[in-house]
Image (spheres, rainbow, N blue to C red):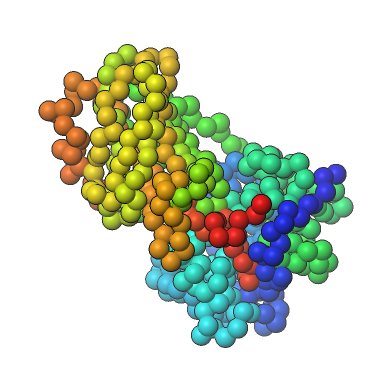
Amino acid sequence: MKALLLVGCLAQVASAAPLVGGGGSPGDADHPVYLTAAQRKARATLIRDTAAASGMTNAALLAGIGEVETNFAHCWSEATWACQGPASSSCGGGPVIAGASDGPCSQQQGGLGMFQFDSGTYQQTINTYGPGIVTIQGNTDAVIPFLVTRAKQSVAGIDTDAEALAWMNSIRIQDGDAEYEKWLYFVAWRYNGCMGCTTQINKYRAGTNKLRDEFGPTFWTIATTPPEPCATIPADGRVIDESDPCFEKGGGATSWYTGDTGMGGRCLYTYTTDDPEADNHATWTLDVEADGTYAIEVYTDASLAQTKQAKYTVTHAGGTTDALVDQSAMTGWQLLGEFELRAGTPGTVALGDNTGEKYVSTAKVAIMFDAVKVTPSTARPGGGDGDEDAEEETPTDNGGCSSTSGGASAGFALGLLVLARRHRRCN
C-alpha cells in the first residue's frame, strides 16, 4: 500500500475548509438544496462525461466531492441560505453559490460553485482560474487537474499525470478497500485541508457512497475511446489548432486556461515567466504528406495576448529555427518563416511561457497558444505574411480559450488556498 507523503507544501493549504453555510451540511433541514432528481442526474452526467474526456473513468469519486461541498448546488437560487457569488451564465445571469463560512458575505471570501473553488476573495478566485470558474462546466473542469497535481505531490510513487489518473481509476468504491480508504484520507487532507480528520473522511465516504448507489455502478461506467491520431498535412496544407490531436500541451495541468478569443473564438493561454525553463509549453506536430517548402504561420489575438517576445521554435528538415513574435501586435496570422518539411519525418512548432517577461501577480503578461497554419509556399497569395487571411479567420463565435495561468492548480474546496504558481514554489 502506497503511503501518503507530504512534500513540503502543506503551509500553502488552508488548515480547514468548512462546508458551505458553516453550521451543517448542504441538504440537511437547515440548509435545503432545491434540485430535482432530473437536475441531480444532469449534474452527475456532466461530472461523469467531463471526467471521461480527461481520461478518468472513476467519476463517482469526483461526484462525491461535489455532494459533500454543496449537495450538487451550483447557483445561489438552488441554496439561498448561502452567499451570493458573481453572476454566472450557468445560473441565467444570476449569482453562483458562494461559501458562507469564511466570514460575512459582504467580505466575498467564500468558495465558488459546486466544487467550491477558493483562492481568497471572489475576484482573486476568478483571477486565478479565469472567468469560466463561475460556470458549472468550468467549475467541473478544474477538479481533475487539481487532484492530479495534489496526488503527484502527496502520494508516494505517483510522479506523472498518467500515474495519478491510473491510481484514481483503480480505486474500488467499497468501505474497507485499502485504496478507497487511502483516497478518502487523501481527499479530506488535500482537498479539504483536514489531514487525518475522521469526521471529514467519513463525510466524503458518505457522499461518495451515496452517489455510487443513487445512480448505480452502470451509470458511472462509461466507455472511453482512444484518442484520435495526429493526421497528416495534405499537399495543400491545413490549420492545426489547440483542439487538434497534433497539438500537445505540457506543464502544470491546473494552470492552463480556456479563453474566448483566438482563431474560431477559442485558444489556450497562460502567463509568461523569466524562469530559465518553461512552466507551461506546447508543441504542434507537422507531419506533411509531401516534401516541400512550407510557410508556417501562427494566429495571435491582440485582445488577449500581451507578450511581445513569444519564442516559437520550428524544427524542420534543415534543423531548428527560433522566431520571435509580438503576439500583442495584431489579430490574425503572423509568419514564422518558410521551411523545408519532409514526408515521414514530422517537423514541430514549440512554444513555452519562459519568454523572459517576469511573472508579477499584479501585472501578468498573457501568452496565447492557438492555431498554426502550414501552407505550401507557392500556394500563398503573393507569398506575403498571411495577413490576407486574418479577416476571414477572425472569430465571430463565442468559444473559449484555454490557458495556463501563473495561478495555482485548479483550486478547490471552501477555504482551501490555491497553490501559487511562481511566488510560492515547492522545492
Let me know if residue 101 appears in the view: yes
Q: Quadrant of the N terminus?
A: top right
- Above or below, comparing residue 333 to residue 381 in the picture: below
Q: Nearer the viewer, residue 50 or 290?
A: 290
Which quadrant of the view contains residue 422?
bottom right
Q: What residue is at 75 percent from the left and 48 percent from the top?
A: 155
Q: What residue is at 49 percent from the left and 62 percent from the top?
A: 128
- Above or below, comparing residue 161 to residue 233 in the picture: below
Q: Nearer the viewer, residue 384 or 260?
A: 384
Let me know if residue 214 appears in the view: no
Q: What residue is at 42 percent from the left and 72 percent from the top?
A: 87
Residue 418: x and y, percent? 59, 63
Residue 291: x and y, percent? 32, 13
With 283 as the anchor, is 416 left or right in this view? Answer: right
Extreme residue in the left direction: 382
Which quadrant of the view contains residue 6?
bottom right
Q: What residue is at 25 percent from the left and 35 percent from the top?
A: 335
